[in-house]
Image (cartoon, rainbow, N blue to C red):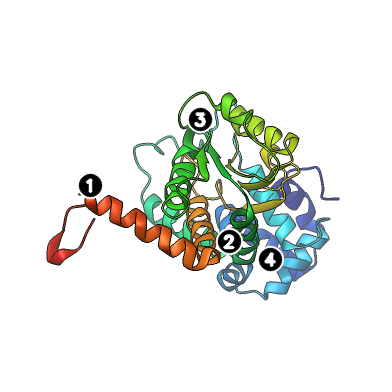
């Protein structure tokens, strides 16, 4: 089991007794908390001038199974109080942080790039098989995750117009939850702090024996409990006041593309029919040099 103490507190207490090389790497982590939570182990090792294996040994010396577990603990420790989930992400050790935060845009983009590298394509492909096989697909996302759900719903409906539903899209979501049935797939997205609606949706999906596909920031997320497929994205690793949805958006786009590929000629035919209908209603205008937007 992982230690209960906050990882940096644990590290600071352990520093005096660590071997010289682990002590050096430990000091680097203490001074580069953001990098430790966002960069790959190889990238972190290169910045510290150390061997990647040293970070694994350090994690084990602190009581973790390996570097990934220590990194997860560092990310978890950065999560804010649920009562103030966004304002607490602003660094309190700088009085001028709101007015003067040079480089934050670059830091956020760098954190997102690292997060994208960590997405699991194999897990997406496996989830796509389940989504493709389902009689109906229900897509759920609430509050900030609504945009993620709407994107997946839109892309799937381009080639599955009759079997994809957006939970709460045409009325109260509880009416949709009551319509879940065995053979359906339910895709729900969330990150800390988790919305009650996302947890209720996951519970309803499990009760109806649907295939549950959860996109979340940690396997311990309440809406990921008991999920048949879990797709993880980094949400809180970046320096912005609001968690990042970049990984979630990348996952749903990959999920839609993989599901389309599994549909073969039938999916292609339906996509062409949808395109023809959109063209007939002049839904698009031509951009420069005939490019449509």
| Label at residue 119 | 2
Q: Earlier in the sequence, mark 2 or mark 4?
A: 4
Tell me whether the residue at label 1 lies in contact with that at label 2, contact meaning CB atoms closer than 8 angstroms. no
Find residue 173 and report its horizontal and vertical position in percent.
55, 27
Q: Position of residue 107 (x, y in %)?
A: 44, 55
- Spatial CA distance of label 2 from label 3 is 28 Å
Instruction: Name the disc covering residue 281, or none.
Output: 1
Q: Can residue 202 be seen in the rendering of this structure?
A: yes
Report the side of 92 relative to 179 (left or right): left
**Residue 117, percent across and down?**
54, 65
Q: Nearer the viewer, mark 2 or mark 3?
A: 3
The residue at which mark 4 appears reads as 24
Residue positioned most to the left: 289
Circle nearer the N terminus (3, 1): 3
Check disc 3 and report its element: helix, strand or loop: loop
- Residue 289, quarter of the rendered image: bottom left
The answer for how far apart the CA atoms under marks 3 and 4 are is: 53 Å
> Marks 2/4: CA distance?
30 Å
Identified at 60% across, 54% down, the residue is 131
Q: Nearer the viewer, mark 3 or mark 1?
A: 1
Tell me the residue that label 3 is attached to: 168
The spot of residue 88 in percent (x, y) is 53, 33
Q: Which badge, 1 or 2, is on the more N-terminal residue?
A: 2
Mark 4: give few (<14), some (14-19) or many (20+) Cα within 10 Å: some
Indicate which disc residue 226 carries: none
Q: In which quadrant of the rendered image does the C terminus lie?
A: bottom left
Foreground pick, 2 / 27? 2
């Amino acid at each position: 089991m992982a230690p209960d103490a906050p990882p940096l507190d644990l590290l600071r207490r352990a520093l005096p007794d660590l071997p010289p090389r682990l002590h050096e790497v430990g000091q680097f982590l203490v001074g580069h908390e953001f990098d430790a939570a966002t960069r790959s182990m190889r990238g972190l090792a290169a910045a510290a001038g150390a061997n990647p294996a040293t970070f694994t040994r350090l994690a084990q010396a602190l009581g973790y199974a390996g570097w990934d577990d220590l990194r997860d603990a560092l990310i978890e420790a950065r999560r804010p109080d649920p009562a103030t989930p966004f304002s607490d992400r602003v660094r309190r050790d700088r009085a001028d942080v709101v007015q003067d935060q040079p480089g934050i845009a670059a830091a956020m983009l760098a954190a997102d790039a690292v997060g994208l590298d960590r997405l699991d394509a194999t897990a997406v492909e496996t989830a796509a098989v389940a989504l493709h096989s389902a009689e109906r697909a229900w897509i759920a996302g609430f509050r900030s995750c609504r945009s993620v759900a709407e994107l997946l719903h839109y892309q799937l409906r381009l080639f599955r117009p009759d079997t994809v539903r957006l939970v709460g899209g045409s009325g109260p979501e509880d009416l949709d939850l009551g319509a879940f049935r065995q053979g359906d797939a339910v895709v729900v997205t969330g990150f800390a702090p988790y919305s009650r609606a996302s947890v209720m949706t996951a519970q309803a999906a499990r009760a109806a024996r649907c295939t549950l596909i959860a996109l979340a920031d940690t396997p311990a997320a309440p809406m990921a409990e008991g999920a048949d497929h879990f797709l993880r994205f980094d949400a809180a690793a970046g320096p912005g006041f609001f968690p990042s949805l970049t990984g979630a958006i990348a996952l749903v786009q990959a999920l839609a593309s993989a599901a389309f590929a599994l549909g073969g000629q039938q999916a292609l035919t339906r996509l062409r029919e949808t395109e023809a209908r959109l063209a007939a209603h002049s839904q698009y205008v031509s951009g420069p040099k005939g490019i449509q937007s």
